[in-house]
Amino acid sequence: TRPEGDLGNPLNGDIGGVGTRSRRDTLAVYPTLAVRFSDRHGMEFSGNFTDVSYDLKLPGEEQDYRFASIGGAWLFNVRPRDTLNFRLTVDDFNPQTVAGAFPSIGSNTYAATLRWTRQASQNHQWYVAGGGTRTKFEEVTGTTPLESKSGWTGGFGTNWQMQKALLFFDAVYRVQPSSSGAVSDQTDLRLQVVRNFTPRWNGTLGARYVRSEAVNPAAPTDYRDYGVLDLTAEWRWTRFVALRGQLSYVRQKLENQGAGGSKVVKLMIAYDSARKN
């Protein structure tokens, strides 16, 4: 199985509450374009449009939102194995207010990030990144005005494919959309270890921790913690099709609501068209 997102770009970091049975519908589009001007110079353009809705509307926990982002990066190959990436992004966050609840706070976030990536070998890659952010908020009646706030973003991680095992670790801090009704400073830690027992059988241990803290102090929910531990067994039927069984334990803590957890068992048929071996 694969981690949710590449190094430095985790996906599905905010899933809403886990203590209430609720359906989450998500539409997400991630267009990308890469242009090479020479062996050492190039540019990347990326976008993101995400629409999230819940069948239950819970104030500060599960609120519908739309998120759009566009970005561009300049790439410079410092050495054959080292790449410098300077990226600018603009995000637009548009949350929906739940009837009778505290008003949601829309915002625009501007970010500049510098990233160094090293391809240590054909099967081993690591990176380190850092930068700054500026978030401007919409004016909301009944809240303490806060026009804008500065912050930082960064991360580091590695992806190491060994002969019979895979090690993936990623740590990211960034401004992200949230179903709490306002953007959040999000800490996202991901760990995955895959062990191949036979050409067809493998097992995976995965762990993830996400902490979201509201950028704007006037937001209805200040923070929430989310953690998940996965144990997965996979039998590969063909090169692209696999049968998976997964046991997950999820635990979440919301401000002023205490902590709660749940266990999930999944049986899946997975198709992976991008698999190389």
Image (cartoon, grey):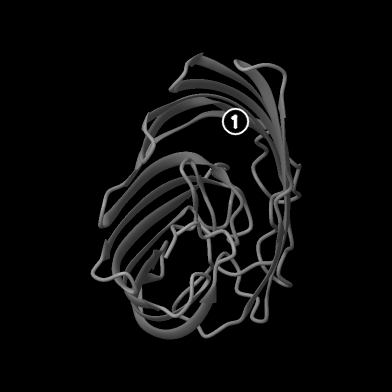
Q: Is 86 placed left or right of 89 in the picture? A: left
Judging depth in this view, the residue of 179 and 97 nearest the camera is 179
Decide if residue 93 is in sight here: no
Judging depth in this view, the residue of 171 and 260 nearest the camera is 171
* Residue under pointer 1: 149
Q: Is 255 placed left or right of 24 in the picture? A: left
Which amino acid type is marked by label 1?
Answer: Lys
Residue in the image at 39% along x and 36% along y: 122
Residue 51 is situated, as x and y percent measured from the top left of the image, at 73, 62
How many neighbours does mark 1 have within 10 angstroms: few (below 14), some (14-19), or many (20 or more)? few
Q: Is 142 placed left or right of 185 in the picture? A: right
Which quadrant: the C terminus?
A: bottom left
Q: Relative to 263, does residue 184 appear above or below in the rendering? A: above
Q: Judging from the image, what secondary structure is the residue with disc 1 in?
A: strand
What is the total number of numbered labels drawn onto the structure image? 1
Residue 157 is situated, as x and y percent measured from the top left of the image, at 36, 38
- Dividing the picture into quadrants, the one containing residue 95 is bottom right
Residue 156 is situated, as x and y percent measured from the top left of the image, at 38, 34
Decide if residue 25 is in sight here: yes
